[in-house]
Image: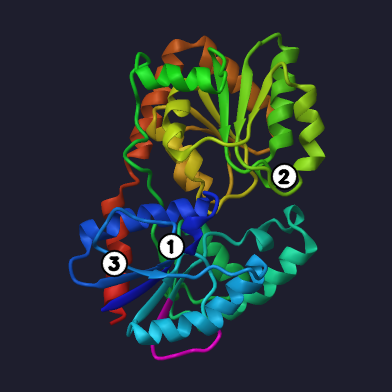
Amino acid sequence: MRIGIDARLLSGNMTGISRYLWNVLKYIPKFDKKNKYFLYLQDEVVLENSFYNYVNVPKSKLPKQVYSHYWLNFVLPKSLEKNKIDLFFTPYILVPVKKSLRKNVIVIHDVMTKACPQFFTTYYKKYMSVVVPQSIKRADEIVTVSQSAKNDIVKYYGVQPDKITVTQLWTDGKYKPLSPNHVQINQIKKKFNLPEIFILFVGALEERKNITGILKISDILKSKHFDIKIVLIGNKGFGFNRFEDEIIERKDRVLLVDYVPEQELPFIYNLAKIFLFPSYYEGFGLPPLEAMKCGLPVLAGKNSSLIEVVSDGGLMFDSEDYDSFASSVIELLQDKEFYESMKAKALMQSEKFKPENEITKLIELFTAMN
C-alpha cells in the first residue's frame, strides 16, 4: 500500500499537532515493514530516515493560507495520482475537495471551537464550522487522540463512533527522570535564569489554558506567605493581551519564557518541583504526560481528556478551584512523604502511554483500508 502523509507542519513552529506528527513519523518505520510512505514537506525539512520517500512542497510568495489551500486542492491531487497513492493521511483536518479513488484519513485532535467557543475569534469559529464538516464528509476514517475527544466528535458533529479510531499520544524517550547532577541540567537552569524551586506550566499562553487562573493561584500562595515562583513556557495565543499586564505586575513571582527548544524541555521538567495545568479543555493534554514521565507531581483541571490522561497520576480539581490548587502546592512542598507518593503515582500513570500500543493501532487502520 502506498501512503501519502501531509507533513508540511514540520516546517513551521513546533505545535501540539506537529509534535504529534514527529512522534508518528519516528515510530512508523519500527512497526510497519509492509507499506510504502511518501512525505509531503518543505525542502528545508530533512528527516534522518531513508525509510520515507520525500516529495517536495514548493514555496510560494502567496499568503500562507491562500497558497496552502491552492496547493492542497490543485497541486497535491496531481502528485498523489503521479505517485499512485492509495491512502492520504493528514495530522490536521484538511484534505483535497475533489474526492478520488484513494482513501482519506484525517486526525481531529479536539473540538475546542464547539466545546469552548468563548476562547476563539468569530472568524476562526466560522472557518472551522465550514471546513471541519466538509473534511469529515470527505474522510473515510477519522483518528483522534483520546476517548474524550472521540465522544465530543460524535456529540458535536454527529459522526458514527465506528468511523473514529482512538490512538492516544505518548512521549519521546527523552522525557524521563534525570539526575540533579546532570551537567546539562545546570546549563539549562543558567540559560533561562530559572529559580531554585519553581512551579511549571508548559502550553500555549492563551485563555483556554486558564493562565489568569494560574496568576490567581500565585496570588493565593503569596497571601499565605508562601514564596515560590511560577514559570510559564509557551507561545502567546488567543487572549494573551488580556492578561499580559497581569503577568508583568507579578514579575517577582511569575517568570515568562516565550520559547524553549524541544530538546531542552525535559531538563526544565526535571528542574521543576510541581507541574500546574488548570486548563479548561484538552483534546489530549501532552504537557501533563511529559511532566508525569519525568516524575513531576501534576495538578490539573478535572475535565475533558485530562481525566483519562492524568487520572490517579496527579491531583485534579475544577479548573477554577484555585484554593484547592494552592493548598495542594503547599501540601506537596511541606510533606515530603506525600510528595514522593505523588511522584511515584505520576511515573506509574505515565507508563500506560506507550508508542508500541498506539502506533500499531494506526498502522492496522491503514492496512485494513487496503
Residue at the far left: name it: 33
- Looking at the picture, which amino acid does disc 3 mark? Ile
> How are the residues colored?
rainbow
Whole-percent x, y for residue 151 in the image: 53, 63
Proximity of marks 1 and 3: CB atoms separated by less than 8 Å = no
The answer to whether 275 is drawn above or below residue 9 in the figure is above
Q: Is residue 306 left or right of residue 327?
A: left
The residue where tag 1 is placed is 43
Secondary structure of the residue carrying numbered label 2: helix
Asked if residue 11 can be seen in this view, the reply is yes
Whole-percent x, y for residue 250 in the image: 75, 21
Q: In which quarter of the image is residue 163?
A: bottom left
Q: Which of marks 2 and 1 is in front?
A: 1
Q: In which quarter of the image is residue 126?
A: bottom right
Proximity of marks 2 and 3: CB atoms separated by less than 8 Å = no
Q: In this view, does 135 lie to the left or right of 216?
A: left
Q: In which quarter of the image is residue 21?
A: bottom left
The residue where tag 3 is placed is 363
Q: What stretch is highlighted in magenta?
A: 97-104
